[in-house]
């Protein structure tokens, strides 16, 4: 019998050679990038023209076709109402969060839908931001599969550090729709630091300033011997280049209205004006002035703009980053002079105004030897390799926003403060305020403000079955758990009686389980196969683990078995192996159950012997040798 | 019968054989185990004292996280993922408690059977401490120039350090009652130091 024992975490996943490498994906507001890493060398996957950036723009054709990327962006001029862009800003958002241009939304909403997640009406279809994001992810997945010549079904996806729980969940749902298992959601600045730190083997305190199309993040990290420890993070999930585009487009439209009279623009004209504004902004990073054309009511109008004018328009947005940076430096408990380098991430950091501002805030020139558009995907790819092939590097991240629950008088009681290292579990006790109260409504919120309505509502649920007690007598313990992806689960229990409720938190702006199931059915041709495969793969991982465990036990304790008992166990192991080859999940589960039954007596005898030796005080050292830090 | 010996050996959830209840991994099958009910010092392999070497603490923390963090178990079964998450969670809790002098003092007092309640805010029984804190607070709010604020901030920092030294001495002399009182004093000093620091950066930006 041949088997090998690996150090925990080092065991390669089964059939690694048949599977494509897990990829790293930067799912951006404006552009997306996919990269793959082998032997710690990450490579951005490019198209035939050498372009690594795929515009996060989707065109929905009348014939049901879906186009993503540069071709979709071109369709913006011909059929703007069939094109969706900047969808990331709507992830996990409600209708009230949307931003209009000259009173017109650059999206057409499905009015039938009320409450919950935003729904767009595009080319006769109703689409959620999750589905549009899934369409972008499918294109990235296809590029990765083409590059590797193998199926790719696992990815590390980056999200803005400041993304709240709803937006994170929405991103994970989108990946699931696209047939990708998310190995880990990694915060964008952290991914950038990973890419940067591994390249430069830097040590010390670094700041990552990430101003993208739709989101702003700033993180302070300590890099040390392969450990990337986030000290503090802050940002604004709705602050980015898009806001500057809006300001320019508003300016162009106001100029036009002054000359040609005011008209209500269409959703398509709003999209085109935004596109022209974006081009103007990008040009003015390298030029001092220029002229751009927008079209309303079939009449084109020309608009001149200088860099100085652009900077005056952009200043209010860029200034907002200053206060956020100062707050984060304070949260990290450091002095700005201790920061050894500032890494720039995101396309908006190409603007000279932004670079000047960063220099002013941190008192030093930012580092710019890395491509700000690709660094996040590179970091994600490195992490994807670390998670699947093993690694010595370690990312230790934090919660970006405080998590709490609503108490009397609409006041938020914080349960987990911001910048707490994750994973984390914290509990807080609450009590009833009426005699005989048997249920308690729990409202989970995320944010820094004291009043409930100034924070983001994450979820509501009701804890039932509280025993009849006087007001204030019940002790309800609410536990918040945040995993390494930054995702929250909430459980509640009543301490005096032990009534417990594990509550699946349903995000206020997310998809319900039913919606998710329907989408999986509708949008994936092989959805059923995909689900079945995934469940089977999980069962196989579990089955292999239990076989390895029994084999390891046989190696040390087989003297406890008679020949006949040993034969039974070997037979049960063989059956598990056969069933794994059969591709039948139920058969694997049944074989695992028989293996467990066949090893029951063996396990009992091993425990007996273990306790006997422990009593004799002999084997304690041997049992303890798995302890120790380094 | 030696009950404690029995309690130190538990069945491994994976191979079902005996494993030390404090072990991180099963020595037979290598499976990660759940976090045992051990104190924060033991968890991070540190001596249970107030005088913690912060560099060593961080080294120990990183060392354990490198082996137990969920990132090491991404390709493993869901049970192993869940156990590593619990391990990493308890490591974070232990590290966050021990690296902070105030939390460490409160934790150690509790461990030594002399709990002190630091959450009870706004109730200073100690009249002297109350007067002192009121004066300092007033001085800080009256300060307007960066130099004044910086001076107060620095004074406060050194008081924080002095207070920590006194706590350390109290622990070492076995005077837990005194260590408790000093911890409450430290709580107010730290709070004031935080305020002074943020006022310092606020004033510095304005000028």
Image (tube, rainbow, N blue to C red):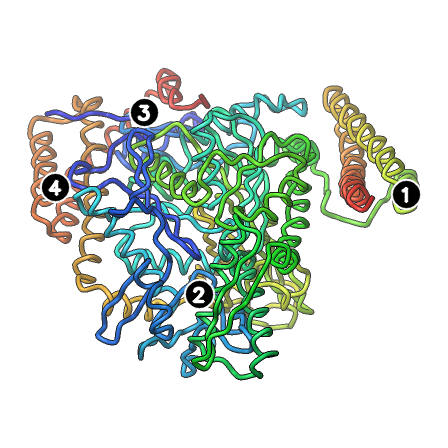
Q: Return the residue nearer the eye: A135 or A502.
A: A135
Q: Is residue A202 above or below residue A351?
A: above
Up-down: is A287 above or below A412? above
Label 1: which residue?
Answer: B143
Q: Nearer the viewer, mark 2 or mark 1?
A: 1
Q: Chain of mark 2?
A: A
Measuring 80% from the left and 28% from the top, which residue is drawn there?
B163
Q: Does the CB distance between marks 3 and 2 fall below 8 Å?
A: no
Q: Residue at x 90, y 43 (%)?
A: B143
Horizontal and vertical percent position of residue A372: 46, 42
Q: Dot 4, crowdedness within 10 Å: few (<14), some or many (≥20)?
A: many
| Chain letter for mark 1 | B
The residue marked by circle 4 belongs to what chain? A
User: Which of these two is toward me, A196 or A180?
Assistant: A196
Give the secondary structure at mark 1.
Answer: loop
Please tell me how crowded label 2 is: few (under 14), some (14-19), or many (20+) other residues with Cα within 10 Å: some
Quarter of the picture holding the C terminus of chain A: top left
Q: Nearer the viewer, mark 4 or mark 1?
A: 1
CA gap, disc 2 to disc 1?
A: 49 Å
Q: Which chain is disc 3 placed on?
A: B
Q: CB of mark 2 within 8 Å of CB of mark 1?
A: no
**Callout 3: few (<14), some (14-19), or many (20+) C-alpha neighbours within 10 Å?**
many
Q: Which residue is mark 4?
A: A576
Which residue has dot 2 on it?
A506
The CA span between labels 3 and 4 is 24 Å
Q: Tell me how far mark 3 sits from mark 1, CA to CA.
A: 61 Å
Q: Which residue is mark 3?
A: B27
Determine crowd level at label 1: few under 14, some 14-19, many 20+ residues with C-alpha closer than 10 A: some
Secondary structure state at the residue bearing disc 3: loop
Give the secondary structure at mark 4: helix
Q: Nearer the viewer, mark 3 or mark 2?
A: 2
């Amino acid at each position: 019998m041949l088997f090998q024992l690996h150090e925990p975490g080092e065991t390669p996943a089964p059939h690694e050679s048949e599977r494509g490498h897990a990829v790293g994906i930067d799912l951006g507001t404006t552009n997306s990038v996919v990269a793959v890493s082998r032997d710690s060398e990450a490579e951005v996957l490019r198209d035939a023209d050498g372009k690594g950036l795929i515009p996060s723009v989707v065109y929905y054709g009348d014939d049901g076709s879906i186009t993503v990327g540069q071709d979709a962006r071109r369709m913006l001029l011909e059929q703007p109402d069939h094109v969706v862009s900047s969808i990331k800003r709507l992830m996990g958002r409600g209708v009230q969060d949307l931003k209009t241009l000259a009173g017109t939304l650059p999206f057409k909403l499905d009015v039938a839908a009320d409450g919950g997640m935003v729904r767009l009406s595009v080319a006769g279809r109703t689409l959620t931001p999750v589905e549009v994001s899934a369409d972008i992810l499918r294109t990235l997945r296809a590029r990765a599969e083409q590059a590797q010549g193998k199926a790719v079904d696992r990815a590390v996806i980056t999200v803005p550090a400041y993304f709240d729980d709803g937006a994170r969940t929405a991103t994970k749902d989108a990946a699931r729709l696209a047939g990708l298992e998310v190995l880990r959601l990694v915060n964008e600045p952290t991914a950038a630091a990973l890419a940067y730190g591994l390249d430069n083997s830097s040590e010390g305190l670094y700041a990552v300033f990430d101003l993208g199309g739709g989101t702003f993040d700033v993180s302070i990290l300590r890099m040390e011997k392969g450990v990337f420890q986030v000290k503090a993070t802050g940002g604004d999930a709705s602050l980015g280049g898009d806001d500057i585009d809006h300001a320019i487009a508003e300016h162009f439209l106001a100029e036009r209205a002054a000359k040609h009279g005011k008209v209500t623009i269409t959703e398509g004209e709003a999209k085109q004006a935004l596109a022209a504004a974006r081009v103007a902004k990008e040009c003015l990073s390298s030029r001092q002035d220029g002229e751009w054309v927008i079209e309303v009511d079939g009449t084109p109008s020309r608009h001149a703009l200088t860099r100085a004018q652009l900077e005056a328009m952009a200043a209010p947005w860029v200034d907002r980053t200053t206060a956020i940076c100062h707050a984060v430096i304070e949260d990290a408990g450091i002095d700005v002079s201790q920061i050894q380098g500032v890494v720039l991430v995101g396309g908006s950091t190409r603007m000279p105004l932004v670079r000047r501002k960063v220099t002013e805030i941190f008192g030093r020139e930012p580092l710019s030897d890395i491509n700000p558009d690709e660094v996040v995907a590179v970091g994600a790819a490195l992490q994807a390799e670390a998670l699947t092939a093993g690694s010595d590097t370690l990312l230790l991240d934090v919660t970006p926003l405080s998590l709490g629950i609503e108490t009397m008088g609409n006041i938020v009681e914080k349960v987990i403060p911001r910048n707490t290292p994750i994973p984390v579990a914290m509990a807080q006790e609450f009590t009833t305020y009426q005699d005989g109260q048997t249920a308690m409504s729990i409202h989970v919120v995320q944010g820094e403000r004291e009043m409930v309505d100034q924070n983001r509502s994450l979820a509501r649920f009701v804890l039932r079955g509280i025993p009849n007690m006087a007001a204030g007598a019940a002790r309800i313990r609410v536990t918040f758990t945040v995993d390494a992806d930054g995702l929250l689960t909430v459980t509640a229990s009543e301490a005096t009686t032990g009534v417990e409720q594990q509550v699946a938190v349903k995000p206020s702006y997310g998809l319900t389980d039913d919606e998710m199931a329907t989408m999986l059915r509708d949008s994936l041709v092989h959805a059923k196969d995909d689900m079945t495969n995934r469940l089977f793969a999980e069962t196989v991982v579990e089955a292999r683990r239990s076989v390895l465990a029994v084999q390891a036990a046989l190696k040390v304790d087989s003297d406890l078995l008679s020949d006949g008992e040993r034969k039974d166990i070997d037979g049960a192991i063989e059956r598990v192996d056969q069933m794994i080859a059969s591709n039948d999940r139920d058969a694997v589960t049944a074989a695992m159950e028989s293996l467990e039954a066949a090893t029951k007596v063996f396990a009992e005898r091993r425990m007996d012997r273990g306790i006997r030796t422990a009593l004799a005080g002999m084997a304690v050292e041997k049992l303890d040798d798995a302890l120790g830090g380094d | 019968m030696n009950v404690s010996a029995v309690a130190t050996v538990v069945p491994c959830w994976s191979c079902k054989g005996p494993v030390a209840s404090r072990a991180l991994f099963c020595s037979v099958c290598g499976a990660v185990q759940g976090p045992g009910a051990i104190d924060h010092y033991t968890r991070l392999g540190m001596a249970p004292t107030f005088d913690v070497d912060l560099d060593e603490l961080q080294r120990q923390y990183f060392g354990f996280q490198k082996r137990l963090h969920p990132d090491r178990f991404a390709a493993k079964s869901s049970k192993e993922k869940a156990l590593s998450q619990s391990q990493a969670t308890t490591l974070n809790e232990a590290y966050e408690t021990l690296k902070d002098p105030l939390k460490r003092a409160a934790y150690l007092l509790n461990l030594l059977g002399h709990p002190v309640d630091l959450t009870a805010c706004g109730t200073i029984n100690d009249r002297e401490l109350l007067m002192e804190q009121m004066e300092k607070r007033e001085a800080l709010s009256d300060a307007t120039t960066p130099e004044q604020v910086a001076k107060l901030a620095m004074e406060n920092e050194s008081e924080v350090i002095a207070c920590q030294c006194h706590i350390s001495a109290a622990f070492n002399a076995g005077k837990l009652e005194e260590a408790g009182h000093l911890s409450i004093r430290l709580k107010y000093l730290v709070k004031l130091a935080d305020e002074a620091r943020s006022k310092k950066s606020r004033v510095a930006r304005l000028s």
